[in-house]
Amino acid sequence: MEISVNDLSFVYSNPESNCVFKSTTAIFSSGLISAVVGKSGSGKSTLLKLLAGLAGQDSSDNQCIFYGTDRLSPSEMAKQGRLSLCFQKPACLPWATVYYNIALPFQLQGKAIEATTIIALLDQFGLSDYRDSYPYQLSVGMQARVALARAFVTAPDVVLLDEPFSSLDVSWKEQLYTFLLRAQSQSTCTVVLVTHDLLEALCLADAIYVIEPRTKSVQPIVLNNPLKQTTSLFSFNDLIANTDFPNLFRRLHESIGI
Amino acid sequence: MKASGYKKIIGYSAVVIAICVASECVATQFRTYDLFLPRPVTLLRFFLNNPAQFFIASIYTCTKILAGLVLGLIVATALSLAGVWFPSIRPVLTRVTLWSQTMPVPLLSPLLGLAFGYNLWSASIVTALICFFPVYLGWEQGRMALPLDVSLLAASYRPSRITYTRHILLPAGFPYALLGVKGAINLAVLGAVIAEFGAASQGLGRLMVRGIRELSPAQSWGAMLILVGIAATMAVIVGRIQRSDRFSYIGGPHDFSSNT
């Protein structure tokens, strides 16, 4: 499902807050992982909230359109359960087991829990042994896996990821990148990944966008990322050893305005 | 039972026996007047001579305490949910609930007796009015401690009001409401006894009043000891629920209220 952002402007209702987006336009291609990078406070998370219809509902419903077999607004996407979110913090429910944390989207949408889907995801994300554990019994990395599995459980058309790996160490990141790439390739959903980690963007995304601080707009920087890793071969070493890496990293670094 | 459980029971028993022995010694040594504080032996004799009287009164009072607690829990939950479902009335609701705590509820007891008769209803209403507040505060604490990420995540699935309440609000608030219930147990016992003073024909509260009237302090103290036992047992049961795996996060790093 393709996501089209047309002439989107947004400012928080707080009178002291600055304009977040000014007439910005972007297209996130169907079935690919698009990364959005930018400095802290540039509006990355706000963009995801707008795409999920959780902020500025009037402007987001008019200016963000999801194109598949039909044309839907963020609110319609959310109501139909075709969109899911994953935040920086795992946001696991502490009173529910891993199984029921992953089943939460079904419960909130008022649907019957698809046990076979959940069991398959538990297996895919290496959580089978922790099915009946509570989040407080898991490490941060395991909780991040639960959150990621939950984002894919309803087989959504669009997955919005808001820096879900930022609090993890390198080994956990490598594992979770593999899980993400595998889950995305199996479901062929469109993923928008917001991150401030350029390495993460370079190894996961098919296309990389930057939030330009000066113009307050989303600019495509890399559209066919040659560094994108495959599910079976993922490692940071492969990424850094690639001859395209220094140039692309420098381009991204300069575009962000660091 | 675990070894720590046995140790606890032995510890509690030792304390009770020590208190009994000490008070027996004090009573024998200083010849305290039985009308003020009956000796443990006198109390024990009274219990053994009137088992049916205490048993029936305990059943009556226990029923009132439990009915009052349940009613209080329902009132507290309803008030908290009303505040969430209708945000515009929340400020008024909070203030009215706070102001209700200045009400001299024990004085209502005879009036309720007149209105509903000297039965379970009037006692339960008085008990509920006295004990609902800590539970209400518990629900509110749970609601306010809910992290923004969890709220946003839930909102992104556009759940209905009922679904959101069932899967997020109630489970999030329940452990905190349990803390409130623990605090409310003592108030419920107090409420039930006060209700029996004013509007009841049976129960441990009635036994206490009758004991004072008939100059039989063993009867009053016996009833009081049973009330302490009832409150302690209920607190142990609630404590057990709190310590279950499901709620073990409370007080730990995953406790919402400690993160906010």
Image (cartoon, rainbow, N blue to C red):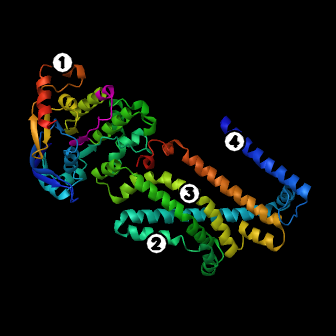
Disc 3 is attached to a residue of which chain? B
- Local crowd size for mark 3, using a 10 Å CA cut-off: few (<14), some (14–19), many (≥20): many
Identify the residue shown where x is 19% and y is 44%. Answer: A42
Q: Amino acid at mark 3?
A: Val
Which residue does the numbered mark 2 point to in the structure image? B96
Magenta-colored span: A155-173
Quarter of the image with the C terminus of chain A in it: top left
Chain of the residue where label 2 is placed in the rendered structure: B
Distance, label 2 to label 3, CA atoms, is 21 Å
Q: Which residue is mark 1?
A: A241
Marks 4 & 3, CB-CB < 8 Å contact: no
User: Would residue B149 be found to the left or right of residue B117 on screen?
Assistant: left
Q: Residues within 10 Å of mark 2 (few under 14, many from 20)?
A: few
Image coordinates of residue A241 in percent, x first then y, are 18, 18
Q: Which residue is mark 4?
A: B8
Image-based side of A99 in relation to A253, left or right: right
Q: Amino acid at mark 1?
A: Ala
2 and 3 marks on the same chain: yes
Under tag 1, what secondary structure?
helix
A28 over B214 or under it: above or below: above
Residue A99: give x, y in percent of width and height: 40, 39
Instruction: Work out whether mark 4 precedes mark 3 in sequence or the reverse, and give the earlier one.
Output: 4
Which SS class for mark 3? helix
